[in-house]
Amino acid sequence: MKKADSISTTQAPKAIGPYSQGIVAGQFLFVSGQLPINPDKGEMVDGDIAARAEQVFDNISAIVRSAGGSMADVVKVTLFLTDMADFQQVNEVYSRHFQSPYPARSAVQVSALPLGSNIEAEAIIYLP
């Protein structure tokens, strides 16, 4: 019995290591940490933390859609920030991508992220 199926889309950045963009296990989709990389250019977006957060959530949304879900199906988000002072701006962007009832969420400050990013997010989605 196959335990999981890999999800891959060109609408989100390619994995930069030995991992999948997402994995479907049962009725759950686990989306790997997404950086603010523009999938068309393969480069980190320029701009402030809000612009970078937009790209992160757009990338998550593309992976969720490729698995047949929507952002309304997201049940848990984990945010990684290199500076907790960015939390309020990220929260404003977050509130445009998710609606009530909002997913459960954690936000943690980390000392560094891949490629020098200042934000990364991962998500768990329930696929009905």
Image: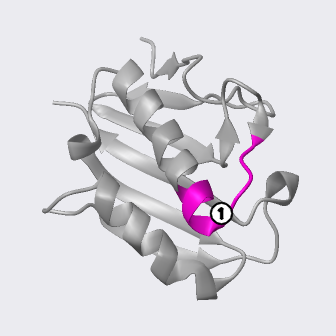
How many labels were placed on the picture? Answer: 1
Q: Position of residue 126 (x, y in %)?
A: 25, 40
| Front position in the image: 6 or 41 | 41
Q: Position of residue 101 (x, y in %)?
A: 13, 62
The residue at the point 55 percent across, 18 percent down is: 8
Name the quarter where the N terminus is drawn: top left
Location of mark 1 (residue): 119
The residue at the point 73 percent across, 66 percent down is: 118
Name the quarter where the C terminus is drawn: top left
Q: Is residue 107 above or below residue 12?
A: below
The residue sitting at the front extreme is 47
Crowding near pointer 1: few (<14 within 10 Å), some, many (20+)?
Answer: many
The residue sitting at the bottom extreme is 85
Describe residue 103's horizontal placement relative to residue 92 as left or right.
left
Q: Is residue 51 magenta?
A: yes
Describe residue 112's horizontal placement relative to residue 75 as left or right.
right
Residue 3: quadrant of the picture: top left
The residue sitting at the top extreme is 1
Q: Is residue 116 magenta?
A: no
Residue 106: quadrant of the picture: bottom left
| Local SS, label 1 | strand
Describe residue 107's horizontal placement relative to residue 1 as left or right.
right
The residue at the point 47 percent across, 41 percent down is: 58
Query: Which residues, given as a range, are shown in magenta?
Result: 44-53
